[in-house]
Image: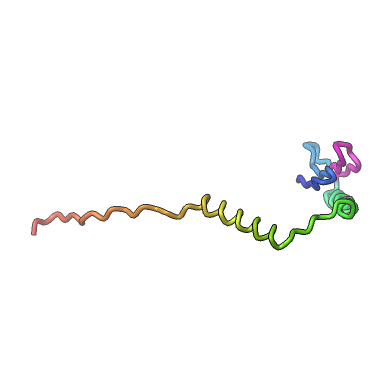
């Protein structure tokens, strides 16, 4: 399991030993073997940090520009043009 909240450098990782570690800026804050307790602590810290790092609100123009960029990228990535297979006449074993 690996979760992160990048603005605050908050991470939840599972070690090879099966220990869940909640870390802030590469410093372990909470360690436990229970995934539920680790997830609860991670979510508690994440909610605390979300108040400190609010998400920016986009204007209508910025949203439109992002949408246009996304559409342009997906159209290029998913080129649907495929040349048609050439039809050749069916062959038969009889001559007539």
The image quadrant of residue 67 is bottom right
Give above or below for 13 relative to 43: above
| Number of numbered callouts drawn | 0
* Left or right, 69 with reference to 50: left
Return the residue found at the far front.
Answer: 61
User: Along the line of sight, which residue is nearer the eye, 87 or 7?
Assistant: 7
User: Along the line of sight, which residue is nearer the eye, 81 or 91?
Assistant: 81
Return the residue found at the far left.
Answer: 96
At x 61%, y 54%, the residue is: 69
Colouring of the image: rainbow
Quadrant of the snapshot with the C terminus: bottom left
At x 56%, y 54%, the residue is: 72
* Left or right, 56 with reference to 37: left
The image quadrant of residue 61 is bottom right
Question: Is there any visible trace of residue 37 in the rendered image?
Answer: no
* Left or right, 71 with reference to 82: right
Question: Magenta: predominant secondary structure element?
Answer: strand
User: Along the line of sight, which residue is nearer the eye, 37 or 74?
Assistant: 74
Residue 79: within the magenta? no
Q: In x, y percent, where is residue 58? A: 75, 58
Give the residues in magenta. 21-33
At x 82%, y 44%, the residue is: 11
* Left or right, 67 with reference to 76: right
Q: In x, y percent, where is residue 42? A: 86, 50
At x 28%, y 53%, the residue is: 86
Q: In x, y percent, where is residue 25? A: 86, 39
Q: In x, y percent, where is residue 26? A: 85, 36
């Amino acid at each position: 399991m690996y979760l992160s909240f990048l603005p605050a450098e908050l991470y939840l990782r599972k070690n090879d030993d099966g220990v869940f570690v909640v870390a802030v800026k590469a410093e372990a804050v909470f360690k436990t073997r229970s995934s539920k307790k680790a997830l609860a602590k991670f979510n508690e810290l994440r909610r605390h940090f979300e108040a400190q790092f609010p998400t920016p609100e986009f204007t209508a123009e910025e949203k439109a520009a992002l949408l246009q960029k996304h559409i342009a990228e997906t159209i290029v990535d998913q080129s649907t043009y495929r040349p048609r297979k050439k039809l050749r006449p069916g062959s038969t074993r009889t001559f007539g």
